[in-house]
């Protein structure tokens, strides 16, 4: 498990990794929810407050870059 956090100062956030992964997961259909509102409400109901994906959301890394399907 990899824990991702955001920068404390907004001016240091070129790209928020948490928002990026969430948007990517929604756009590629990796989450059971179909909207951000639905995913946030489902996550709030879970005891661990975690998001569950149907498939891996990030492509594996190789020595030369990303491995895309």
Image (cartoon, grey):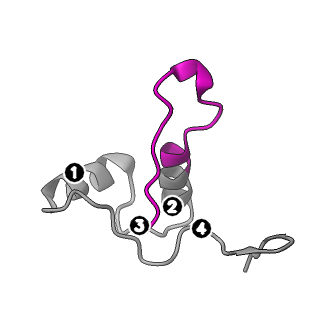
Whether label 1 touches label 4, CB < 8 Å: no
Label 2 vs 4, first from the N-terminus: 2
Whether label 3 touches label 2, CB < 8 Å: yes
The residue at the point 59 percent across, 67 percent down is: 58
* Alpha-carbon span between mark 3 and mark 1: 13 Å
User: Judging from the image, what secondary structure is the residue with disc 1 in?
Assistant: helix
* Alpha-carbon span between mark 4 and mark 3: 13 Å
Whether label 3 touches label 1, CB < 8 Å: no
Q: Which residues are magenta?
A: 1-20
* Alpha-carbon span between mark 3 and mark 2: 6 Å
Confirm whether the magenta stretch covers residue 33: no
Label 1 vs 4, first from the N-terminus: 1
Label 3 vs 2, first from the N-terminus: 2
Q: Position of residue 43 (x, y in %)?
A: 24, 56
User: Judging from the image, what secondary structure is the residue with disc 4 in?
Assistant: loop
Confirm whether the magenta stretch covers residue 9: yes
Magenta stretch, main secondary structure, is loop
* Alpha-carbon span between mark 2 and mark 4: 9 Å
Please give the residue where the numbered disc 3 appears in the rendered image. 31
Quadrant in the picture for the N terminus: bottom left
Label 4 vs 3, first from the N-terminus: 3
Q: Quadrant of residue 39?
A: bottom left
How many discs appear?
Answer: 4
Please give the residue where the numbered disc 4 appears in the rendered image. 58
Please give the residue where the numbered disc 2 appears in the rendered image. 25
The residue at the point 56 percent across, 48 percent down is: 20
Label 1 vs 2, first from the N-terminus: 2
Tell me if residue 49 comes above or below residue 28 in the rendering.
above
Q: Callout 3: 10 Å neighbours few (<14), some, many (20+)?
A: many
């Amino acid at each position: 498990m990899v824990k991702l956090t955001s920068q404390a100062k907004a001016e240091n956030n070129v790209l928020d990794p948490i928002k990026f992964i969430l948007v990517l997961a929604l756009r590629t259909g990796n989450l059971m929810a179909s909207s951000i509102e639905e995913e946030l409400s489902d996550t709030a109901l879970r005891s661990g407050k975690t998001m569950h994906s149907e498939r891996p959301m990030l492509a594996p890394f190789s020595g030369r870059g990303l491995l895309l399907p």
